[in-house]
Every structure is written in C-alpha cells, then in structure tokens.
Image (cartoon, helix red, strand yellow):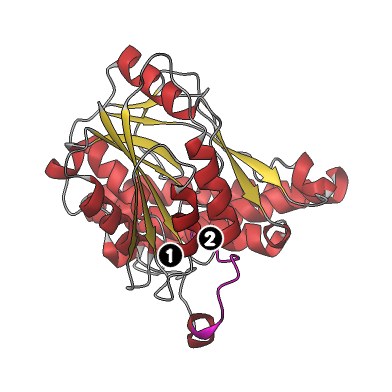
Amino acid sequence: MRIAVCIITYRRAESLHRALGALAGQVFDGAGPEVRVVVVDNDGARSGEPVCDAARASMAWPLDYAVEERPGIPFARNRCVEIARPGADWIAFVDDDEEPGPGWLAELLRVQRAYEADVVTGPVLPRFVGEVPGWAVKGGLFERLRFPTGTRRDRAFTGNVMFRAEVFDRVRPHFDERLAMSGGSDTHFSRRVYEAGYRIVWADDAGVPETVPASRVAAGWVFRRAYRIGTTNGFIARDLRSWPAAAAAVVPFALYRVVKGTALAAGGWLFGRHWAVRGVRQICYGAGMLVGLFGGRFDEYRRTRSMERAPARGRGSRKDHP
C-alpha cells in the first residue's frame, strides 16, 4: 500500500517544522505502508524550502517540495494531488499547524479496513498557545463536532483526512478554485465525493492537535470565521443543488440559527460572556448562509500587496475548514 501525505503551507516555517517532525514519528504494526510526503508551498518566496531540506535528513520517507505561486488554498491543494496521485493508493492531508500523534496514520488505515471506507476523517483538537480567556473555554468555541468511530459522514476536511486515490480520478474538478480566497474548497470537494457514492467514515481516535495562536482567541475572529463558514456553506448548497432545493434547505436552517443565536446572546446578561459570544456566532453563521445562498462572498484569505511583500515569519493562516 502506497500513501502520499500532503501538507500545504504559507509562511509558517516553525509550525511546518513541527508538523514534518510529527509525520516522521509515525509508527505501524509490522512493516507499515510505503509513505511519501508532499509539501506544496503557496509562497513564491519559497519560505518552506529550507524546512523541507532539513526534514529530509531525519525522515525515512521521500519528501517532495514544490511551489504553487497562484495565491489560494485550492490551487495549492490541487498541486498536491497532481504530484501525489501518480503511484499512490491513498492521499492524506494534514495542515501545517498540526502535529499528528505517532499512531495517527495507522489508525486511519485501521478504520478504513474495518469499515471499507473510501474516505476516512478524524477530529482536529485545539491546542492553545498562552493563556485562554474563560469565555472561550466555557463556550467550547474552538471545539469541533465529534462522532463515534465508524459514523458515516457526508463531508470531510483536509485538516485530517485520507482519500482513496481513485476518488481524484472520478470527481473533477478537485478543489474548486472559485473558492481560492473564501475558503471551503475541501467541504465542496468532499460533498461531491459523498454524492458520487463514496463512503466517508469517521475515525475518532485519529485526532490531530492544532495550534490555536492567541490572535484567534478573540470574539471578532470567532464571528468572522462563523460568517465565512456560513457564506461558504450557502454557496455550496446553491452550487450543488437546484435553486428551489437549495433555498428550501438553507433558508429555514439559517433563520433558525439567527433566532437561536439571538436567544443565546440575550442570555449572556444572565449566564456570562460565553453565552453571548456563542449566540452572536450563531447569528453570524446563519446570516452568512443566507448571504452565500444569494451569491455573496467573504474573502477571508485575500492577500494584500503589503502581505505579499512582507518577509516570511511563519505566522500566516491558511486554513479553510470549520
């Protein structure tokens, strides 16, 4: 069995170094699969190249490094697939700010065999840097949904996923480049994979820790991210369904989120700031879904000219899944 593990990166040299170190520490029962690591740098200045050169010295597997100069997550992901697909039976993705534990890849493979899955995905676990405000902890604002191992899912996110390689031969285009600056191309692709009849299964013990910098532990960031995810999901519903079907699915759900969020936000006067933040987040998500359904966009990842000229310091944020 041949597996390509892909990482896209953008100006995060330190976290990329840690991610590659974690991949190098994967362990398997017996001989294990034939593994290849693919890193695609979305920085034309090649800030990730020295990190990859250094990692090859301690990694037992081949490591391919390439640059995708077109700015945007789907461009980099599609370049990963282009490099990884020849000779691969499976293609996995993790993010450059994650550090998979030593049994991560083995657990994905175990669950795949146990449930005859075509796609296996698992949880991304927040790991905070520095002190965390009480409202963020009490509100569970950085916790993501989890499910029992073996649960069938209708989507997956590239922060922690392994695809049967043939999926990329049948489901085209891969990561939709219309979503280059708004994010969500992994959700869009995996939804199409699901609708093509492939089996997506959850592996709850294959969690990967994700570094959450202090800059994200702010109410404004939480609200912007919820709004962006909402607009993306509204767009996906509109893109993959007829207009009446998309409207029938999105409008009631979005309005429910707005009403529920309003009630939660009002409860913040009694129960604390975490209730209020949770409520406003729900409102932002619901409003975003309606905006996305009617064609609006929120380009969270758009780079300015000053960002492109800035020196690489390993602090970029290139992540488009919830």
In the rendered view, would you say 11 is above or below 80?
A: below
Residue at the farthest front position: 57
Checking the image for residue 291, the label placed there is 1
Residue at 64% of width from left, 57% of height from top? 222
Q: Tag 1, which secondary structure?
A: helix
Place of residue 10 in the rendered image (x, y in percent of width and height, measured from the top left): 48, 65
In the rendered view, would you say 115 is above or below 206?
A: above
Q: Amino acid at mark 2?
A: Tyr
Q: What secondary structure is the stretch in magenta mostly built from?
A: loop
Judging by the rendered image, the residue that carries numbered circle 2 is 227
The 10 Å Cα crowd at callout 2, few under 14, some 14 to 19, many 20 or more, is: many
Say if mark 1 contacts mark 2, CB within 8 Å: yes
| Viewer-side residue, 61 vs 279 | 61
Q: Amino acid at mark 1?
A: Val
Place of residue 142 in the rendered image (x, y in percent of width and height, measured from the top left): 65, 45
Q: Which residues are magenta?
A: 309-318
